[in-house]
Amino acid sequence: MSQYPHIDLPALDPDLPLTLGAFASEIAERYGPREAIVFDDPLNSARRTSWDYRALLQQSRRVAKSLIAAGVGKNGRVGILLGNRPEFVSSIFGIALAGATAVTLSTFATPDEIAQLIALSDIDVLITQRTIARRNLAKEIDTLLAHLPHAAYPFLRRVVTLGAMPEDRSESWDEWLGSGDSVSDALLDARAARVSGNDEAVIIYTSGTTALPKGVIHLHSTVVKQFRWESQVYGRHIDTRIASPFPLFWSAGLVSVLGSTLVAGGTYVAEEVFEPGAALRLIAREKIDEYYGFPTHTAALADHPDWQHADLTSLTRVQGNNEFDGHPNTKPDPNWNHVVAYGMSESCTSVVSHLSTTPTRIQLQSSGLPPARHRTSYYRHWRQRGAARRPGRGDPRERPDPDASLCRNAAGRQLRSRWLVPFGGHRVHRCKWLFALDRSDQANDQDGRSECLS
């Protein structure tokens, strides 16, 4: 036991808001004029856009009013097909304030995949952008949805396009926002007050790496709890300036990067498209202190010709973080360590984690502990001859069951089990640490799935 010392993971304040809409109002009141989001907008000649926390709430309320004016009701589903940009964030919070459910759609998806996801999700309104990188999303959507209403998408009544041109069939973002100006603040506040932490907040589609993408339905309380917990796990603070290529339409970008930063009053610097040279310049210009990416991202930065002489003096959250840790210009914070965690879409990011203050030597021994107040169970659904049984302690197939943060269901289907079935071989130590096993030693009983049973 001594080699796995106890670490107190943070408890959450039960009096804080548990809905995304109330969360947006809370941070606007708390942090007001502080910079919340920065973005170089390709749809506006790469001009630097900056929103403070009050502007974020104001824009979110405009989205909410436009949804109300469009007739979207409680639990109505609104698709977001956007890159990492401020309007993605205002859409997430605006949809929540209106009492609707956000459906985040991958900009990596093909037109056929987008069509399938729209049909599966029963979307009422689709919010998208004209172009992203070299892709013309508006043209693809126009071809896909030539006429509305459409029998294949019986609930879809409106498509709104950021940066729309006159030749596009969809409604422009600015016109659509203007359509909600007649909705009163009193009506919006009344709608927002009827939303509870137990209502559906967001449907996040899995990547489809090991199976067909599944639309994981998360409650407001699940998302907000993860925002707050991840903020403490990663040690985010009011002066945090974080940049990341992680897409907001997946849980890691939405929760581990965006939400956890906003909790602390920090600044999220959005990257819509990852390009190593541009990322290095962005870090220098915006004084980024934490760059959150996959090892492939940091490796690409290190391979760029400008890497050795890049101004990375603002980066302090680098200890244990691949190439950044060894760069001559970074200034590592000795009290912060790159976080080792384990999670998935079904748990709205982390199931278990270490704190950023946990020494690296300890982090490398396990994937960590479940967050405070998450129940750890030694029961799980065991797929053997259609029966469920209880594995014994020490069984490699034990799993922690983060009941407070596990998905409610999947869009368009009924889950057969509430038990967590993650990928890879893991075991739970008697002190509740989660350990990864060598994949070659574990029998995969999931038929290639990394999601909840469905």
Image (spheres, helix red, strand yellow):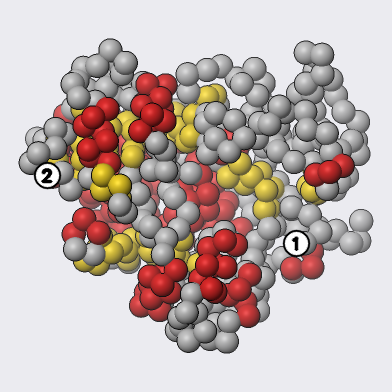
The answer to whether one can see residue 25 in this image is no
Query: Is residue 242 among the parts visible in the rendering?
Result: yes
Q: Locate residue 357 relative to residue 146 in the image: left or right.
A: right
**Closer to the N terminus: mark 2 or mark 1?**
2
**Vertical arrangement, residue 435 with respect to residue 75, above or below:** below
Crowding near pointer 2: few (<14 within 10 Å), some, many (20+)? few
- In the figure, 275 relative to 72: above or below? below
Q: Quadrant of residue 396?
A: top right
Q: Measure the alpha-carbon separation of dots 2 and 1.
A: 51 Å
Front-most of 187 and 336? 336
- Residue at the image position 54 percent from the left and 57 percent from the top: 231
Residue 306 found in image quarter: bottom left
Question: Which amino acid type is shown beneath numbered disc 2?
Answer: Met
Q: Helix, strand, or loop for circle 2?
A: loop
- Residue pointed to by mark 2: 165
Query: Could you tell me which quadrant the N terminus lies in?
Result: bottom right
Q: Residue 150 location in percent, x, y?
A: 24, 16
For residue 317, which numbered disc appears in the image? none
Q: Quadrant of residue 360?
A: bottom right
* Residue visible at 43% across and 34% down in the picture: 202
| Amino acid type at mark 1 | Gln
Q: From the top left corner, tell me how far across and down residue 47 is, in percent.
A: 21, 66
- Residues at circles 2 and 1 in contact by the CB criterion of under 8 Å: no
**Residue 319 location in percent, x, y?**
64, 74
Vertical order, 13 against 450 (above or below):
below
Q: Residue at x 81, y 59 (%)?
A: 365
Task: Pick the quarter of the image with the C terminus.
Answer: top right
Q: Residues within 10 Å of mark 1 (few under 14, many from 20)?
A: many
Residue 241's x, y, as percent?
A: 43, 69
Query: Which residue matches tag 1?
Result: 363
